[in-house]
């Protein structure tokens, strides 16, 4: 049946909402596409390791463990691929593992670090960074353990084109890549002239309305696990010493928490996945 258009049937706000919905849908499709090879590799490993009937069962088991522990499917698949496989026939994936309490997050609005969702912590560090730097534009990224670089996780005040362009950044050509490489905060006083940017990245940032930026690595043990960046709509001078100290403290706190999350929450999810895959009753489970 053909839908008939009636003049005045749609308000301008309806059109805007529909465009936003379609863009969000496109981002989800792109995320699924970029994650598919990694998830497929994890499915194959699980199918072989536990002698599962098919790849669908492997996916469903990962999905179940992901939902139970509130760990993103990509993060879980990445850990399956990256970490040493469990001992054949072993009841546990990580026998004798020592659990440590969650590090403090006293600079963030997080009630209980030991039960906080990673997305909530990343959202909180973005909010804190914007408050310290007095701006309304920013983004936070997480390290890509599998392929290197940084994945966009949270953003605010930035255009859809910016988010799409910087969905994943490599080891050079941006301020966040430079901060990750040097393991230090990086200030770009004027995006239009700073040599840190590749020309296509410079154009994308300027098009989004950002004229300067400041990137703060989320660090644990000298290793960058993520990045938070503040963007400004005008060229800026150096940040004050107190601002730099506050950002450094928060970056190290969140970096330590991310390291704890990887070796605690993610490993809990893997342990649960191991138990599920060894259970004969779960051999025909299907994705939800």
Image (tube, rainbow, N blue to C red):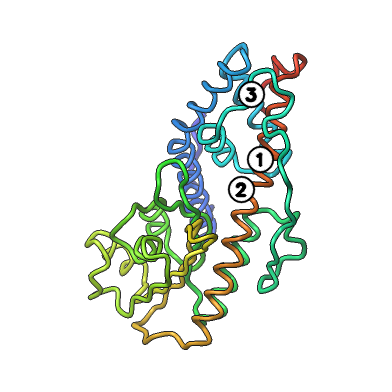
Mark 1 in CB contact with mark 2 (< 8 angstroms): yes
Q: Which x, y percent locates residue 213?
A: 39, 74
Locate the C terminus by quadrant: top right
Q: Which x, y percent locates residue 71?
A: 64, 43
Query: Which residue is nearer to you in this view: 101 or 213?
Result: 101
Instruction: Tell me the number on the disc at residue 78.
Output: none
Query: Which residue is nearer to you in this view: 17 or 4?
Result: 17
Query: Which residue is nearer to you in this view: 66 or 223?
Result: 223
Crowding near the residue tagged with mark 2, few <14, some 14–19, many ≥20 C-alpha atoms within 10 Å: some
As displayed, is residue 218 above or below residue 279?
below
Q: Residue at x 52, y 63 (%)?
A: 218
Crowding near the residue tagged with mark 1, few <14, some 14–19, many ≥20 C-alpha atoms within 10 Å: many
SS of the residue under disc 2: helix
Q: Badge 1 is on which residue? A: 267
Measure the C-alpha gap from mark 1 to mark 3. Answer: 15 Å
Q: Quadrant of residue 102?
A: bottom right
- Indicate which disc, 1 or 2, sits on the residue closer to the N terminus: 2
Horizontal relation, residue 205 to residue 75: left or right: left
Q: Quadrant of residue 77?
A: top right
Crowding near the residue tagged with mark 3, few <14, some 14–19, many ≥20 C-alpha atoms within 10 Å: few
Measure the C-alpha gap from mark 3 to mark 2. Answer: 20 Å
Instruction: Tell me the number on the disc at residue 262.
Output: 2
SS of the residue under disc 3: loop
Q: Quadrant of residue 174?
A: bottom left
Q: Which x, y percent locates residue 42?
A: 53, 28
Q: Residue at x 52, y 74 (%)?
A: 248
Q: Which x, y percent locates residue 6?
A: 50, 48
SS of the residue under disc 1: helix
Instruction: Tell me the number on the disc at residue 87.
Output: 3
As displayed, is residue 174 above or below residue 95?
below
Q: Residue at x 71, y 33 (%)?
A: 95
As displayed, is residue 76 above or below residue 233?
above
């Amino acid at each position: 049946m053909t839908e008939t258009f009636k003049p005045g049937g749609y308000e301008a706000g309806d059109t805007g909402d529909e465009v936003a919905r379609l863009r969000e849908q496109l981002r989800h499709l792109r995320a699924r596409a970029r994650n598919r090879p990694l998830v497929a590799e994890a499915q194959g490993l699980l199918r072989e390791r536990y002698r599962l009937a098919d790849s669908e069962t492997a996916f469903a088991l990962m999905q179940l463990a992901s939902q139970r522990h509130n760990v993103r499917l990509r993060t879980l698949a990445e850990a399956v691929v990256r970490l040493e496989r469990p001992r054949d026939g072993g009841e546990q994936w990580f026998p004798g593992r020592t659990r440590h309490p969650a590090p403090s997050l006293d600079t963030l609005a997080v009630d209980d670090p030991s039960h906080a969702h990673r997305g909530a912590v990343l959202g909180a560090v973005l909010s804190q960074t914007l408050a310290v730097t007095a701006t309304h534009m920013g983004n936070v990224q997480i390290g890509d353990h599998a392929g290197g670089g940084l994945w966009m996780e949270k953003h605010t005040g930035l255009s859809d084109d910016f988010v799409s362009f910087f969905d994943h950044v490599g080891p050079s050509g941006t301020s966040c890549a430079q901060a990750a490489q040097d393991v230090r905060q990086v200030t770009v006083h004027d995006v239009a002239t700073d040599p840190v940017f590749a020309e296509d990245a410079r154009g994308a940032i300027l098009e989004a309305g950002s004229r300067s930026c400041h990137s703060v690595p989320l660090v644990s043990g000298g290793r960058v696990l993520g990045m938070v960046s503040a963007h400004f709509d005008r060229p800026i001078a150096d940040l004050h010493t107190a601002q730099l100290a506050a950002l450094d403290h928060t970056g190290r706190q969140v970096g330590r928490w991310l390291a704890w999350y990887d070796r605690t929450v993610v490993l809990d999810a893997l342990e649960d996945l191991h138990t599920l895959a060894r259970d004969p009753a779960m051999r025909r489970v299907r994705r939800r």
